[in-house]
Amino acid sequence: MQSFETELLTQEENLSGLAAINRELITRAEAIEAPQRVVLEMDSTEIPVYGQQENSAYNGHFESTCYHPLLLFNGEGDCLAAKLRPGNVHSAEDRAELLLPEIERQQQLGKEVVFRANAAFAKPEIYEALEERGVKYAIRIPANDSLERDIAELLTRPVGRPSHKPVVWYKGFLYQAASWKTARRVVAKVEFHTGELFPRVGFIVTNL
């Protein structure tokens, strides 16, 4: 088993074959139940390593020496594609290599594609690539002073006795960051929880 893992599986053609087998199995499952809308979700994760493994590196976010693989899932949680990367690369590095072929594959089947991701993928080049291909998306973006000014009226705690249930407010508005070529729709979510002094605030950019 050790020789299989360290010799056979490390050969490039065998790694490609493993990826192809995984995608073929998921393709068969998709054929059984074929919704017209496909949700794709991209994320990265941490694989801590110990010793001097090749291409491992220290990652300040995870505070560990690790690999930092990139993963692409469908809405059912199936892993459609993965790439092992050095530990010190950005979360969104190599995203086009995994994401764009899967978008093309699904669109050739006549399916509507929707993409969602966390704030690590909040990059204008990602929005533009998705918009060029007619892909709908919802991507979390980091809060900043400008965004919070646009929802200032929602940031004041409701008057009266606090509710045991969270008080949740939403607001949608057009916003253009300095690095964007055009304005895009942003949706804010503001939550007030009992016992917490400040609201929880989140923003997504979306063309849905």
Image (cartoon, rainbow, N blue to C red):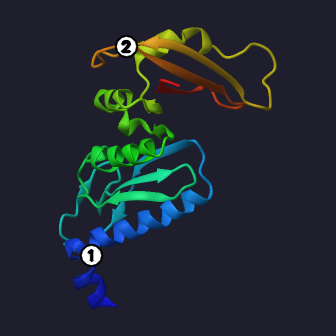
Lateral position of residue 5 relative to residue 102, left or right? left
- The quadrant where residue 57 appears: bottom left
Count how many numbered circles sit on residues in the image.
Answer: 2
Lateral position of residue 180 relative to residue 199, left or right? left
Residue 180 to residue 25: above or below: above
Q: Which residue is mark 1?
A: 14
- Label 1: few (<14), some or many (≥20) within 10 Å? few
Which of the two residues, 132 or 94, is positioned nearer the viewer here? 132
Nearest-to-viewer mark from 2 and 1: 1
Mark 2: amino acid: Gln
Mark 1: amino acid: Asn
Which of the two residues, 59 or 188, is positioned nearer the viewer here? 188
Residue at the spot 62% in from the left edge and 20% down from the top edge: 170
Lateral position of residue 193 relative to residue 89, left or right? right
Which of the two residues, 195 or 158, is positioned nearer the viewer here? 158
Lateral position of residue 195 relative to residue 55, left or right? right
